[in-house]
Amino acid sequence: MRRDEFPDALRRAAEITGDHDLVVIGSQSVHGAFAPAVLPQAATASGEVDILTAHDIEGDKMWLLAGRGGGWGDQAKIDGVDITTATLPEGWVDRLIAFPLDDQPDCVIGWCLDPHDLVVSKAVAGRDKDCRFIEALANAHLVDPAVSLERLAATDPGCRQPRPEEIERAGVYLASLPRPDQFYHPAYRTAPKGRRHPTRDEFSAPADMYADLRHARPDPDGSQDT
């Protein structure tokens, strides 16, 4: 996704949800930390923007995004996600980076993951495309794998909980990547004056919409829950 397409996706998500604070937890959150000129192509290859909304315990906003955020024309696909979608390190909300669409107090802000927190999520997922993404950032000296490895040791218990073997695999992978001999330090934007930073208690797993169906499922012995 090009940098000029990212704000359009955020505007569309704001129109759908009515929220002006949107957390981007997928790969497109790199736009919050880095200028387009320094981002390698592999870091922006995805055409989807994963949006986490605050105060969405019923999952209404998430499902609205999933239903109405599909690609339109040549524009990107917006996907609504919940906090259990990704494994993230403790303190990730405190490190969110503001991507304001303008300097007005009520502007739409995309709150983007700190790049090293994003690398933790990608390393645990461990798909080929995730590894290509991480290596592209590392080779461009945009992240230090050792920082992500350190953060991997303490993950947020409210996010997706990885299996021990996933943590081990991610740790071995991150330790195998070379540390940059020089490091590009991002130039973070700031939110407009008067806008507060999101807090961790605004994000929780949505209600389980299938709980009632599971509760009514017959037991293997032929009995049924009541």
Image (cartoon, rainbow, N blue to C red):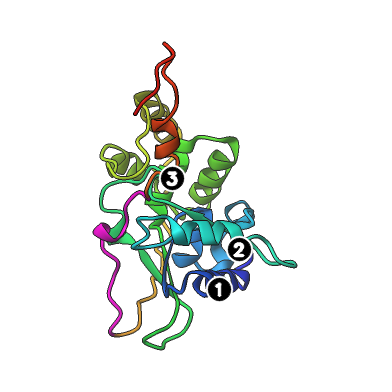
**To which residue does mark 2 refer?**
68
Q: Position of residue 180 (x, y in %)?
A: 43, 48
**To which residue does mark 1 refer?**
7
Q: Residue furthest right?
A: 73
Q: Position of residue 182 (x, y in %)?
A: 42, 54
**Residue drawn at (38%, 55%) of the image:** 58
Q: Is residue 34 left or right of residue 148?
A: right
Q: Position of residue 129 (x, y in %)?
A: 59, 41
Mark-to-mark CA distance, 1 and 2: 17 Å
Asked which quadrant contains residue 173, the reply is top left
Asked which quadrant contains residue 156, the reply is top left
Q: Amino acid at mark 3?
A: Met
**To which residue does mark 3 refer?**
209
Please state, as top left, top right, bottom left or bottom right, where the C terminus lies in the image: top left
Please state, as top left, top right, bottom left or bottom right, where the N terminus lies in the image: bottom right
Mark-to-mark CA distance, 2 and 3: 19 Å
| Image: 206 above or below 1 | above
Q: Nearer the viewer, mark 1 or mark 3?
A: 3
Q: Is residue 9 left or right of residue 29?
A: right
Indicate yes or no whether the magenta region holds residue 202. yes
**Residue drawn at (32%, 56%) of the image:** 203
Read off the magenta span: 194-206
Label 3: element kind: loop
Q: Nearer the viewer, mark 1 or mark 2?
A: 2
Label 2: element kind: helix
For marks 2 and 3, the one nearer the N-term is 2
Q: Amino acid at mark 1?
A: Pro
For marks 1 and 3, the one nearer the N-term is 1
| Image: 179 above or below 219 | below
Residue 25 visible in the displayed image: yes
